[in-house]
Amino acid sequence: MSEVTADLPPGAQLLRREWLGFDESGQALIRFQALPAFTNRHGTIQGGFLAAMLDSATGICALARLSPGLTVVTRSLDTRFLKPAAVGPITARARVIEQTERDMVMRAELVDVQELTVAEATAQLRILAKR
């Protein structure tokens, strides 16, 4: 699965999402660029942007695991913020935890350039036929 920037949805373009593929353990790797415009009054990345990265990572990982005629929507995103995140590249590691015919449970973590986990989430996704 390859993404071309012009083909990305606007939110993914804003987050500068880049699909890196799957690692040897089967986790999806997705890179984002945390921009200075994403910072809060403390100079770190505002939590809403980190949550958007986690939501994007779980969704794109799920899509990579499904047949082309299916899509997913997020039903819930339980997010935990662990450490302040700095401006710069942030890599998501996402994986499927459970899957039924109608639902998927995903987990993702965001890792900064020092390999510190800054946030993590569990997402409940609904599987739908594409329209």
Image (spheres, rainbow, N blue to C red):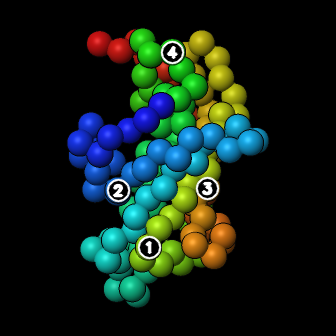
The amino acid pointed to by label 1 is Gly
| Residue at mark 3 | 109
In the picture provided, is 38 more to the left or to the right than 18?
left
Instruction: Tell me where residue 76 appears, x and y as whole percent.
Output: 50, 40
In percent of the image, x 35 and y 57: which residue is there?
15
Mark 4 falls on what kind of element? loop
Can residue 95 be spotted in the picture?
yes
In percent of the image, x 51 and y 15: which residue is there?
67
The amino acid pointed to by label 2 is Arg
The amino acid pointed to by label 3 is Glu
| Residue at mark 2 | 16
| Between marks 3 and 4 in the image, the one whose residue lies nearer the viewer | 4
Task: Note whether 33 is above or below 53 in the view shown.
Answer: below
Quick one: 49 or 13, which is closer to the camera? 13
Q: Earlier in the sequence, mark 3 or mark 2?
A: 2
In the picture provided, is 11 more to the left or to the right than 109?
left
Question: How far, Cα to Cα, is label 3 from label 4?
Answer: 24 Å
Q: Earlier in the sequence, mark 4 or mark 2?
A: 2
Quick one: 111 or 103, which is closer to the camera? 111
The amino acid pointed to by label 4 is Ser
Disc 2 and disc 1 in contact, CB within 8 angstroms? no
| Residue at mark 1 | 88
Q: Earlier in the sequence, mark 3 or mark 4?
A: 4
Instruction: Tell me where residue 70 appears, x and y as whole percent.
Output: 44, 16
| Between marks 1 and 3 in the image, the one whose residue lies nearer the viewer | 1
Question: How far, Cα to Cα, is label 4 from label 2?
Answer: 25 Å
| Residue at mark 4 | 67
